[in-house]
Each structure stands twice: as structure tokens, then as C-alpha cells.
Amino acid sequence: MYFAVIINLYSRRVVGWAVSNRMKRDLTIKTLDMAVGLRNSSKGCIHHTDRGFQYCSGDYQKRLKRHGFLLSMSGKGNCYDNSMVETFFKSLKVEVIWRQKRAIRGQAEGAIFQYINGFYNPRSWHSSLGGKSPLAFDRRDA
């Protein structure tokens, strides 16, 4: 199972995510579409990714430009560039994936949905947000 996520680095909120049995560009496009739908406006937002083939694809790049994102990609071999996303993935694996065996993809997707929308965004506190959750921080800034 493959997983893609877009995190708003300002609020630490997961704004887009998708799960697939294959790592293809449609996985990341689905994630981007969710993020754009949630955020209303992306004009001028910086979209940072690693150099994965799915993020470099022409379809993905065109979609980013159409929505007005400023593009940013990690430097070659720079493993620290996406530390926020890597930290999220580690937490997801520890809290959800490794704790329970899931027989079907649908069950895993449900558990991931519950983790993001039931815990991570509304309740997990972040020291960088003054001890607030991503949703609470977003509400304060709205």
C-alpha cells in the first residue's frame, strides 16, 4: 500500500491524502485535488516535494501551475528537506499501521482517515504551534 500526503507547513494540518495499491502519479494528483478543494485558494502557496517521479510528472506539474502554486523541490540527495512529512509518516506508522494488521485496504484507509481526522488534525498538539492542534491553530488564524 502506498500513501501520499500534503501538509500545510504553517499549521501542520494534513490538507490532502490518498492511499493506493500502486505508486503512480494519480495517487499524488488525487492528494493534490483534495488539498486544493479544502483550502479554497492555492494562489501563491509554495508547494514543496521531493524529486519522486510522480511529483515530476508533466500532469502533476501542470495541475500545480493551473492552481497558482509556486513550485519547490528538494535538492538531490537532501534527506532533510521533507522532514515534516517524514515525521508525519513515522507517527502514522507507529500509531496506526504497525499496531494493527489490516486484511483489506479499505480497513487500512478507514484507520488512516480516523487517525488524520479524529486525532492528528483536531487533537495532536504541536510545540511549534504553541501547544495547539493544527485545526485549533487554523481556526485561530482564520
Image: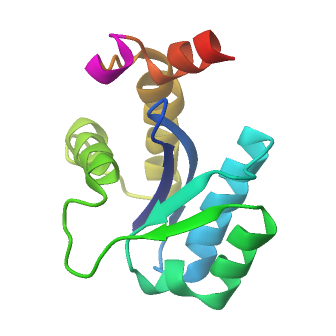
Up the image or down, 5 lies above or below 55; here it is above
Q: Quadrant of the N terminus?
A: bottom left
* Residue at 69 percent of width and 52 percent of height: 44
Q: x and y percent of residue 55 in the render?
A: 51, 77
Q: Is residue 57 magenta?
A: no
Is 70 located above or below residue 107 in the figure?
Answer: below
Q: Is residue 18 visible?
A: no
Residue 45 visible to an observer of this rendering: yes
Q: Residue at x 43, y 23 (%)?
A: 119
Q: Residue at x 78, y 47 (%)?
A: 37
Q: Could you tell whether 67 is left or right of 22 in the image?
A: right
At a point 63% along the width and 14% down the height, the residue shown is 139
Q: Nearer the viewer, residue 23 or 68?
A: 68
Front residue of this view, candidates 92 and 59: 59
* In the foreground, 67 or 34: 67
Q: Is residue 129 magenta?
A: yes
Q: Is residue 63 above or below residue 137?
A: below
Residue 120 is situated, as x and y percent measured from the top left of the image, at 42, 28
Q: Which residues are magenta?
A: 127-131
Q: Quadrant of residue 104?
A: bottom left
Answer left or right for 86 relative to 26.
Answer: left
